[in-house]
Image (cartoon, rainbow, N blue to C red):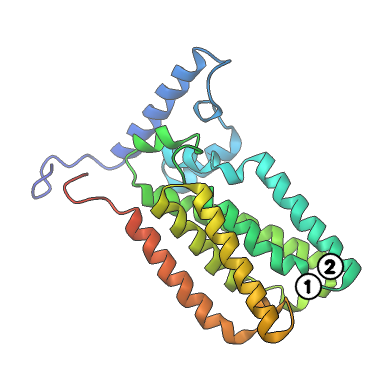
Amino acid sequence: MNVGGAGRAPGGFESRLEAELVKVVTARGAVRPGAAPAVWRRQGLVERIAGRLLRSPGLARALVTTPSLLVPWLIASTVVLAAGAGVTLGTGQPLVALLAPAVAAAGIAYAYGPGIDPAWELSRSMAVSDRTVLLVRALGVFAVDAGLGLAASGASGAALGITFGWLVPMTAVCALALAAATVARSANAGVAAGLAGWTITVLSGQVADGRFTAAVSDTTLILPYLAAAAICGAIAAYATRIPRGTS
């Protein structure tokens, strides 16, 4: 424990320590390539760029191995939103606006979780907190899913009118999924909470307004969505706090 700044590590020491740790565990995994999980292998250009931007090799490795940012998940998300865009073009109903929050909520939930996270062991030994890893991952997943949703909305003209209308509810649903995942320490619990919350919201809009799209087009819901996002975000932050007496 440092007292009054005594014994403080020199600048950049933590980053160098993380870099050496990543090298060690990568080399350890390379001893048996057939059995080594992907997290222990080099990730290439994307990881190197992320490492420079984040100034943390370990955090970059945790980011690029986020389950919901891996190629199979991205392909699945793209297919779902593309199908929504196709239905929107055929029926005129902005299905993308209803699908995007659900897809993003599932992705956010799987950005956290012992048991499903290939980088969990690495994150336990990094000189950064769970909260930092989770924040970077959540922002990365949200940005990617929002980009996919915007692209799908742009491809289906009927959805352009509420292209940004679903970003606020998307934020609220993602925060709900993240809060449930961190509190329950289960990505599946987060997915269930996010999808259930969004389904109830959409059906409630249908009952009250007669339209499924009321959940994303009714501007009176913006403040409740933002309030829900703030509360759930605070819950997630509290669940990932560092207990007193630890460092």
SS label for mark 2: helix
Q: Which residue lies furthest to the top in this view?
A: 31
Can you tell which mark lies on residue 88? 2
Q: Which amino acid does label 2 sit on?
A: Thr
**Is residue 217 something that shows in the picture?**
no
Distance from disc 2 to disc 1, alpha carbons, whole Å, reads: 7 Å
Give the camera-side residue of 110 and 146: 110
Residue 29 placement, left or right of 6: right
Q: Is residue 185 above or below residue 41?
A: below
The location of residue 219, given as percent across then percent down, is 62, 85
Quick check: marks 2 and 1 in contact, CB under 8 Å? Answer: yes
With respect to residue 163, does 151 lie above or below?
above
Quadrant where the C terminus lies? top left
149 lies above or below 213 = above
Report the residue that reaches farthest toward the front.
207
Q: Which residue is drawn at 66% across and 74% down?
A: 203
Q: Which of marks 2 and 1 is nearer the N terminus?
A: 2
Residue 212 position in % (x across, y down):
72, 76
Q: Is residue 161 visible?
A: yes
Picture residue at 47% right of the left edge, 73% below the top = 228
The amino acid at mark 1 is Ala
Element class at badge 1: helix
Image quadrant holding the N terminus, namely top left
- In the picture of the structure, the residue carrying the numbered disc 1 is 159
Q: Is residue 192 left or right of residue 209?
A: left
- The image quadrant of residue 215 is bottom right
Q: How crowded is mark 2: few (under 14 residues within 10 Å), some or many (20 or more)?
A: many
Residue 28 percent location from the top left of the image = 44, 17
